[in-house]
Image (cartoon, helix red, strand yellow):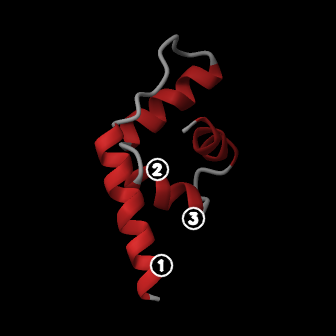
Amino acid sequence: MTNLANLGLEDYGNPVFEEYSNTLYQFAQVRQEMNCIRGQSDRHGIVKTRKFLTALVAQGVDLCRK
């Protein structure tokens, strides 16, 4: 999530950031991580493991179908 948050800080309109910040993670948590990196918050973003793994499997299935 930290790498994705850094990508969002550099280029908010990056297609990779837009896709994965909403599919693998909850966008609010990515935003929280971005605030932590900026020093605006002491709390890091939280990864919801079930959502992450479910989305990761779905991404893998989509790639296999192509």
Q: Mark 2 points at which residue?
A: 21
**Separation (CA) of disc 1 from disc 2:** 18 Å
Find residue 25 and report its horizontal and vertical position in percent.
40, 45
- Please report the residue visible at 40 percent of the width from the left and 77 percent of the height from the top: 62
Quarter of the image with the N terminus is top right
Q: Do the residues labelled 1 and 2 touch (CB within 8 Å)?
A: no
Q: On the picture, is 9 further left or further right than 41?
A: right
Q: In the displayed structure, would residue 23 be above or below residue 61?
A: above
| Sooner in the amino-acid sequence: mark 1 or mark 2 | 2
Q: On the picture, is 17 further left or further right than 63?
A: right
Residue reaching furthest to the top: 42
Q: On the picture, is 10 further left or further right than 59?
A: right
Secondary structure type for disc 3:
helix
Q: Which amino acid does label 1 sit on?
A: Leu
Q: In the displayed structure, would residue 49 be above or below residue 55?
A: above
**Separation (CA) of disc 3 from disc 1:** 17 Å
Q: In the displayed structure, would residue 57 be above or below residue 64?
A: above
- Please report the residue visible at 62 percent of the width from the left and 16 percent of the height from the top: 39
Find residue 50 and report its horizontal and vertical position in percent.
29, 43
| Sooner in the amino-acid sequence: mark 3 or mark 1 | 3
- Please report the residue visible at 59 percent of the width from the left and 50 percent of the height from the top: 12
Query: Residue 15's mark?
Result: 3
Q: In which quarter of the image is residue 4?
A: top right
Secondary structure type for disc 2:
helix
Q: Residues within 10 Å of mark 1 (few under 14, many from 20)?
A: few
Q: Which amino acid does label 3 sit on?
A: Pro
Q: Name the residue under label 1.
A: 63
